[in-house]
Image (tube, rainbow, N blue to C red):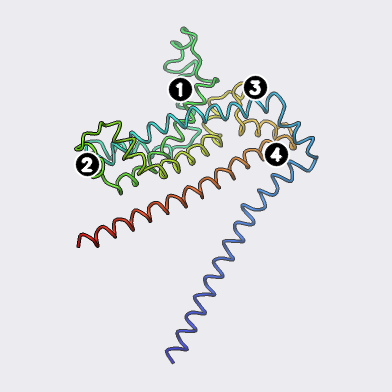
Amino acid sequence: MSVVIGKRESIRTRAVQCAFIAAALLFLFFFLGIPLVSVFYEALHEGLRAYGSALVTADARSAIFLTLLVAGIAVPLNLVFGIAAAWLIARFDFHGKSLLLTLIDLPFSVSPVISGLIYVLIFGMQGLLGPWLFDHDIQIIFAVPGLVLATIFVTFPFVARELIPVMQQIGSEEEEAALLLGASGLQTFLRVTLPNIKWGLLYGVILCNARAMGEFGAVSVVSGHIRGKTNTMPLHVEILYNEYNFAAAFAMASVLTLLALATLVAKSLVEWKFADARGGSVRYVATMEKKIS
């Protein structure tokens, strides 16, 4: 009797699993698969020549270059901040530690539009520092520096938030041993800390770069939508779509989609390597504990 009941429970469990899997696949198909196919269909339905022409215009080339430039500046700066913040939080106890963690998480809870507006209120012509910047011929709002600042704000949590649990997990024993053996702080970081956190660091950089290239809200507020000067790829897509130039808009959107897919592949590879590295560390620790015991 118990065997029959066990088989029934097993069948029910499999049925529930299949139902959840089917629901997840249907959700992905309707809310991810169909939109992705639609983007590439709309981008290519007028032919490859029209697709290529939309991507080689002066405005399109400027938008692509500006997106890469902003990401190329914001991501390295967030990399430095993320490493420093993670090291400080994971290695030291100090007053204000909880406040620092809260501030790191702030961009997750603040609307990007509001963050862009804050920069306008500070650096705009009618803002706090606007008159002084104007007198010294320094332009931040409606220029590349404003785009970089807005992008840094919305992306700086990614590297730090990825590294903090990693550094807390690995501990500081190896670093302390290296210092006792006479290594300098820089040598300890390069030869001990960095190899231990490299996969987590790369994972955070990938996420940060993906958000930087796709950011719209904060960048839209500080850009001024100046064609050929302050329009990134997402802003360029919006302008083309509002002008009913759908083929060009979807062509640019397809480039963003390809970048997102490339980021997803890189993220998956890093997750796989990161999990493998963590598994190897766990196996090594377990082996050493057995030897000691």
Instruction: Say whether residue 252 is left or right of residue 269.
Output: right
Is 4 drawn above or below residue 237 in the view shown? below
Q: Quadrant of the C terminus?
A: bottom left
Disc 4 residue type (three-letter): Phe
First in residue order: circle 3 vs circle 4: 3
Q: Where is mark 4, residue-wise?
A: 250
Give the residue at x 42% y 44%. Answer: 199
Q: Nearer the viewer, residue 166 or 43?
A: 166
Q: Nearer the viewer, mark 4 or mark 2?
A: 2
First in residue order: circle 4 vs circle 2: 2
First in residue order: circle 4 vs circle 1: 1
- Which image quadrant is residue 159 in? top left
First in residue order: circle 1 vs circle 3: 1
Q: Nearer the viewer, residue 63 or 19?
A: 63
Q: Where is mark 2, residue-wise?
A: 177
- Which image quadrant is residue 184 in? top left
- State the image coordinates of residue 281 (x, y, percent, origin top left): 34, 53
Q: Nearer the viewer, mark 1 or mark 3?
A: 3
- State the image coordinates of residue 75 (x, y, percent, origin top left): 47, 32
Q: Where is mark 3, residue-wise?
A: 228
Instruction: Say whether residue 104 is left or right of residue 57.
Output: left
Disc marking residue 121: 1
Where disc 3 sits, the SS reads: loop
Where disc 4 sits, the SS reads: helix
Disc 2 residue type (three-letter): Ala
